[in-house]
Amino acid sequence: MILNKNDLRIWAKSKRKELDMTEISVVLAKKLVQTDKYKNAKNIMLFYPLKDEVNLLSLLNDETKTFYLPRIKGDELECCIYSKGDKLCESCFHTQEPICPACNKKNIDLIIVPALACDTDGYRLGYGGGFYDRFLSDFRGVKICCIPKELMVKTVYSETHDIKMDLIIS
């Protein structure tokens, strides 16, 4: 039985390995681009996926949008403009991140936020570092998670510092 965030993280990571994330990513990207929230956004922050995460990098082919990727600086996230093919480097968490100068997050209309699991109340379970919750604490744009339906749960044991998503696509 899952009773806390740590147990849920272990379960979600294990469950994710059972899924065909390539196929799921294609389906979720199609669903995302059909939403008004995506259609109305001009500046979108994605994330560079880890091996078992949803991969939405196909969105970079949409030449009507400007895309951004996050970069870790100390305990904070920065956003950097990114175009398909721009040089990336490996972060301390083994994710790929841009090497260009940081931008102001106020330019961003929509952020696609990674998650291990999401709940029916609109909260996401991250990896536990709080990077996105801090980054999103004063963000006024749209926040979306795209996640396999198999990783939707009743609760992610949200806390007061956790940021609710505007939309969860599964």
Image: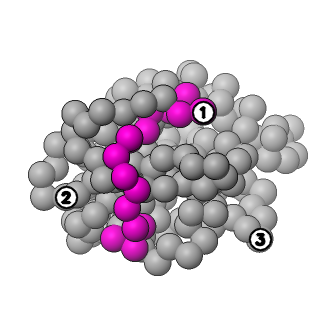
Counting residues from the start of the chain, the first of labels 2 and 3 encountered is: 2
What element does badge 1 sit on? loop
Give the farthest residue toward the front. Answer: 101
Residue placed under numbered mark 2 in the picture: 65
Q: Residue at x 86, y 38 (%)?
A: 1
The three-letter code of the residue at mark 1 reads Phe
Marks 3 and 1 close (CB-CB < 8 Å): no
The three-letter code of the residue at mark 2 reads Lys
Q: Position of residue 133 (x, y in %)?
A: 63, 61
Counting residues from the start of the chain, the first of labels 3 and 1 encountered is: 1
Q: Place residue 135 in its image quadrant.
A: bottom right
Comparing labels 3 and 1, the label whose residue is closer to the camera: 1
Left or right of 64 in this view: 76: right
The three-letter code of the residue at mark 3 reads Thr
Residue placed under numbered mark 3 in the picture: 160
Label 2 neighbourhood size at 10 Å, few (<14), some (14-19), many (20+)?
A: some
Residues at marks 2 and 3, CA–CA distance in whole angstroms? 33 Å
Asked if residue 76 shows in the view, the reply is yes
What element does badge 3 sit on? loop
Report the magenta residues as a range: 91-107
Residue 157 lies within the magenta run: no
Label 3 neighbourhood size at 10 Å, few (<14), some (14-19), many (20+)?
A: few
